[in-house]
């Protein structure tokens, strides 16, 4: 059973700053950190069997507003489309208080964990 929506909060910590992640030079929430939280929320929408996992395959996100160290960020992922039995599309958003700071689309594909890892490490 899938959750159509997952929402949680995260705090901007030093290792999630643009200056720490080398995605910029200022001490604000790094876009890669925001995207990682969005992917985390989307993956939590999928309650998969132990032998399955999901992998991110597409993401198109706008980072609209900067957030400082210590800010509480609310992440929301909503399933927008079940393309087929393996491919799921999401709308992801990030908020600081009531302000939208980022949003976009994300796609995940459901895979067999063992087969995926074996294929990855046996790539020729």
Image: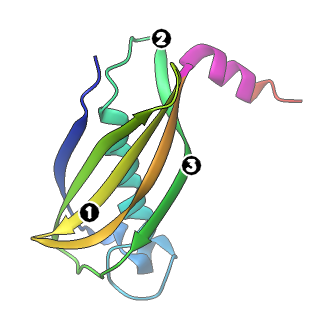
Which residue is located at x 41 percent, y 36 percent? 81
Indicate left or right for 96 with 24 as reference: left
Q: How crowded is mark 2: few (under 14 residues within 10 Å), some or many (20 or more)?
A: few
Q: Earlier in the sequence, mark 1 or mark 3?
A: 3
Placement of 114 over or under 72, stated as above or below: above
Of 6 and 116, nearer the camera is: 6
Q: What stretch is highlighted in magenta?
A: 111-120
Indicate left or right for 33 with 86 as reference: left
Can you name the residue that lies furthest to the right here?
124
* Mark sitting on residue 51: 2
Report x, y in % for residue 31.
42, 70
Q: Residues within 10 Å of mark 3 (few under 14, many from 20)?
A: few
User: Which type of secondary structure does the marked residue at label 2 adopt?
Assistant: loop
Report x, y in % for residue 114.
59, 15
Q: Which of marks 2 and 3 is nearer the N terminus?
A: 2
Of 42 and 121, nearer the camera is: 42
- Which mark lies nearer to you, 2 or 3? 3
Placement of 93 over or under 87, stated as above or below: below
Quadrant of res 63: bottom left
Which residue is located at x 36 percent, y 63 percent? 34
Q: Magenta stretch: dominant SS?
A: helix
Q: Which of marks 2 and 1 is nearer the N terminus?
A: 2
Q: Name the residue under label 3.
A: 58
Q: Name the residue under label 1.
A: 94
- Which mark lies nearer to you, 2 or 1? 1
Can you name the residue that lies furthest to the bottom here?
26
Report x, y in % for residue 117.
64, 23
In the image, residue 50 lies in the stretch drawn in magenta: no
Of 68 and 3, nearer the camera is: 3
Which residue is located at x 89 percent, y 30 percent? 124
Indicate left or right for 9 with 22 as reference: left
Report x, y in % for residue 51.
47, 11
């Amino acid at each position: 059973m899938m959750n159509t929506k997952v929402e949680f909060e995260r705090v901007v910590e030093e290792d999630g700053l643009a200056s720490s992640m080398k995605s910029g030079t200022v001490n604000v929430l790094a876009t890669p950190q925001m995207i990682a939280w969005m992917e985390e929320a989307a993956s939590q929408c999928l309650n998969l069997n132990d032998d399955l996992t999901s992998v991110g395959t597409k993401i198109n996100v706008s980072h609209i507003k900067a957030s400082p160290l210590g800010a509480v960020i609310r992440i929301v992922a909503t399933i927008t489309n079940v393309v087929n039995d393996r491919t799921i599309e999401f709308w992801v958003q990030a908020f600081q208080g009531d302000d939208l700071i980022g949003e976009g689309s994300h796609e995940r594909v459901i895979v067999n964990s063992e087969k995926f890892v074996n294929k990855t490490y046996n790539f020729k």
